[in-house]
Image (cartoon, grey):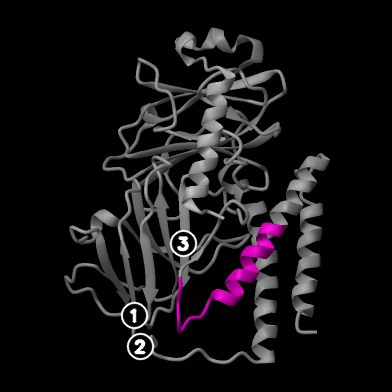
Amino acid sequence: MLTDAFAESLAEAEKLIAAAPHVESEQDLVEGYRYLAGGILATTHAAWAVDRRHPTFISGTGPYTKMGLDNPDTLYLGAVISDDAEYVVTGTRGTTTDLSFQVLSGNYTAANVPGSESAFDDRAIDIAPDGSFEIRFGPEPAAGRRNYVTLAPGSSQLVVREVYGDWSQRRGTLRITRPDTAGEPAVPLTPEDVEKRYARAGKALVSRVRTWLKFPERFYLDQPANELTEPRSTPGGLATQYSSVGHYSLGPDEAMIITVPHSDAPYQGFQLGSLWYISLDYTGHQSSLNTSQSQTDPDGMIRLVVSERNPGITNWIDTVGHRRGYLQFRWQRLSRELTADDGPVAQVVPFEQIADHLPYHGSNVIDPEDFASRIAARRAAVADRMLA
């Protein structure tokens, strides 16, 4: 059968899910199988959509294809490229807070992080008054040409991130073409090609599961629980991005209060992730907040309350029933280096004492009807962004 290799890989991936070291409950396992379903969708889509001679951008992760602690505020697009060809990327700039481009060499694996060959945001390119732009990526030296990026040897992926500082912002448009093959007709499929594509999808699925189970061990789990690192340049070479990370372990009668300055960075966001290293449900739960969605206290600080139960606080971060998980701050489009003073401070307190640790508690309170309105607004914004 042409799908035999994929079926074998699927069985291997299922065993990895079932044997994951963090699985403690039926919820953990059920979420693992949902995560596996997203991996199947993403890898089979990529195996059939990717064509090196006729490139196209495809979504790297979304609500049903999560991986790599995906940011709820970000649309991820990627295209497979070759270092010996030229590509033209055209589009229109939306109203989102950030639009960044990154050229990678290699892939994420359980042992390696791909090399970042170049990374920049839209401030580095010329954009027309109507928002349109054109960027060329190719093997030739830039030689002072604007909107031209030289592809380093080994370049294999072009990743684009469109970041929402406000979920009502308008997304832009994006297209990639390869001029030397643009007029070629598509090559008809053969049984051999079909078999190869299924095998490629299966191999990618197993690698995907292995990689993102291993990745947090190097960047998160090497520090004590319920602490966050100082802001640091994000691993992987993203331009103008800093992050602060950690992992939490909270009982049902505990809460974590995270205090962080309302940054001057154009984008600042916080989220929780499950031990599958994916975002928690951010559509029907407030498991993430950026600065535009957060309440800032009169002293310029944002105080987030992470807990299982709803404390009736505007900045409640819902653990969605996960007593353990990952903590992640991101700052983007920076024009300066961040220091420890820009970073978060975390404190675990008894749930019943939350009010005692919030200096502006009276103004932090929100009634159930208003909080329900916040959830409804999240659902509408995700639908408008068409992330599915």
Q: Are marks 1 and 2 in contact (CB under 8 Å)?
A: yes
Bounds of the magenta segment: 37-56
Residue at horizontal 51 percent and vertical 69 percent from the top: 106
Q: Which quadrant of the figure contains the N terminus?
A: bottom right
Whether 220 is drawn above or below 149: the answer is: above
Q: Which residue is mark 2?
A: 180
Residue at horizontal 34 percent and vertical 49 percent from the top: 98
Residue 307 in the image: state x and y as whole percent: 63, 25
Q: Does residue 134 appear in the picture of this structure? A: yes
Q: Which residue is mark 1?
A: 86
Instruction: Say whether disc 2 or disc 3 marks the residue closer to the N-terminus.
Output: 3
Q: Does residue 149 appear in the picture of this structure? A: no
Q: Secondary structure at mark 2?
A: loop
Query: What is the C-alpha distance between the residues marked 1 and 2?
Result: 8 Å
Q: Nearer the viewer, residue 136 or 56?
A: 56
Q: Horizontally, is 352 left or right of 268 in the view?
A: right
Instruction: Say whether disc 3 or disc 1 marks the residue closer to the N-terminus.
Output: 3
Amino acid type, residue under disc 3 in the picture? Leu
Q: Nearer the viewer, residue 36 or 348?
A: 36
Residue 39 included in the magenta stretch of the image: yes
